[in-house]
Amino acid sequence: MKDKKNTLARLGEFGLIRRLTKGLKADASVAVGPGDDCAAIRVSAKEYLLLTADMLVEGVDFFPGERSELVGRKALAVSLSDIAACGGTPRYALVSLGIPAACPYDRVAGIFNGMKRLARRYNVNIVGGDISRCVKLVLNISVAGFVAKRRLVTRSGAKPGDVIFVSGSLGGSIKGRHLRFTPRVREAAYLTAHFKVTSMIDVSDGLWQDLGHLMSASGTGAVIYADRLPLSGAASGIEDALSSGEDFELLFTMPLVEASRLLRVKNGFAFRQIGFVLPGDSGMKLVGKDLRPLKVKRPGYRHF
Amino acid sequence: MKDKKNTLARLGEFGLIRRLTKGLKADASVAVGPGDDCAAIRVSAKEYLLLTADMLVEGVDFFPGERSELVGRKALAVSLSDIAACGGTPRYALVSLGIPAACPYDRVAGIFNGMKRLARRYNVNIVGGDISRCVKLVLNISVAGFVAKRRLVTRSGAKPGDVIFVSGSLGGSIKGRHLRFTPRVREAAYLTAHFKVTSMIDVSDGLWQDLGHLMSASGTGAVIYADRLPLSGAASGIEDALSSGEDFELLFTMPLVEASRLLRVKNGFAFRQIGFVLPGDSGMKLVGKDLRPLKVKRPGYRHF
């Protein structure tokens, strides 16, 4: 009986979001609403205000044995990564903490210190928040930032023929990098300042799944070369690089001419071309060197 | 042994916030940082961006038996109340949901519908958020809004001799009003448009405790006339009106001349004068009709 109920386990995170936000209206000041890495709000002639929020729960997104400073660092970093994915600069953070009554002060202080340190490095001001009692530690960070209008990148601008890139390397994040990853704020600033980036997302639920979000928002398909995926030292293989979550790398697209230029200029960043955008009816394909299709077994991280 | 530990139960919410935010730095763009109802950010010549966040936890701030629509309504309303307390207009909301895997879809949809309905009424756009798995339902709402610079009200501007007012009525909120209260956005807009409001806060933790926040931020004391407190129909008495949480009324101060004008003009709102601001060394006093001091037994709601 139980699994017949309309539970979240059955709907899944994205099914749930689709249903909840269906028919949600926004006024003309909202340039980008729910469903992208950030919301973008028209606030001045030249800039958008970017808004994003992330909730991390103990036992799901971090664990009791993990170092407090790193847990706090991560909680903020995931939101900075969202701002980066839209091409923006993070500026202000609100920190909400749900804390068990018996939680030692040192745990909370350590988490907050980890946030403070990362905030300082990225010139982000922690300007407020809330504290509540909860059976588990829950951290919710909301970040506000800005992006020049001509530099805003969403998920929906990819065009067939664009080249698909990813920053850094993929896979095995669970072995430690998920707590220490660098939010790609500088990479995004570099890209949007010098190139025409047509679409971008940060890889939080596994490359294949997030590529799916990018392509479905753009109404396009994609072909990915398996042998071009940049595997991290901790990755167990291609499947891991495709499906394991929390890489927090940038996945983005740009026209061929731009892409060629990106590959030729020295910039100190690691951007790897991994495939091409295809027309929408082509679907998403993973191919080997000989272009023969390969199977993707695990599509990505599921929250429910 | 246990109660000797440095737990949150021992520090209390406000002790914890004081310790966490000690030494927190902000750049020149931050006009108001942590410790007020909202943060205020310099974004243009005429306006501040206001940012606020509130976390509500099932079993603490709302309960399984309570109607989903009302729970969602409340979650958004508490943040609208914070924006109101700074004199601002709420505009954008981010909704983070921590949801047990077995939670029925209807519960989540009902909560979200309650938010949507209230958002529509106040012209607030729900522009994004996050969903995570959690053992208890956790709702975190962040709201961004704007306030004209000359209309920003903080907690710290009360001056000795100012009159203390409260909107609406107090006490007994737990009997139902805590789920159905009206965030005083319109009242705040009226007040800041027509009067010089020197300080303001929303009453979330009980009048006496929140008056303490207002007076300590302003470096002032206060005298409150017990017989002038506007008791709600659900209030059990003066103690209840002083100490029970979640009234979400506006508590504010203005100079005598302004106060007199407020009492003389017809505006359709319920503002009650309840006392005076005193010099800082006078402390906070509750008095009877004959000005004899009365004792306040319970100072207000404690989160830990």
Image: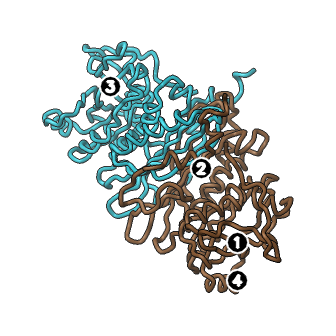
Chain colours: A brown, B cyan
Q: Chain of mark 3?
A: B
Q: Residue at x 67, y 60 (%)?
A: A203
| Label disc, if present, on residue A138 of the rendered structure | none
Dot 1: element: strand
Amino acid type at circle 1 is Val
Quarter of the N terminus of chain B within the rendering: top right
Instruction: Return the residue nearer the eye: B295 or A145.
Output: A145
Q: Is residue B22 visible?
A: no
Which residue does the numbered mark 4 point to in the structure image?
A263
Amino acid type at circle 3 is Val
Which tag is nearer the camera, tag 3 or tag 1?
1
Cα–Cα span, label 4 and label 1: 19 Å
Which residue does the numbered mark 3 point to in the structure image?
B223
Same subunit, labels 1 and 2: the answer reads yes
Dot 4: element: helix
Please determine whether, in this image, residue A44 is positioned above or below residue B104: below
Dot 2: element: helix
Determine the image quadrant of residue A198: bottom right
Same subunit, labels 4 and 1: the answer reads yes
| Label disc, if present, on residue A223 of the rendered structure | 1
Which residue does the numbered mark 2 point to in the structure image?
A14
Q: Chain of mark 2?
A: A
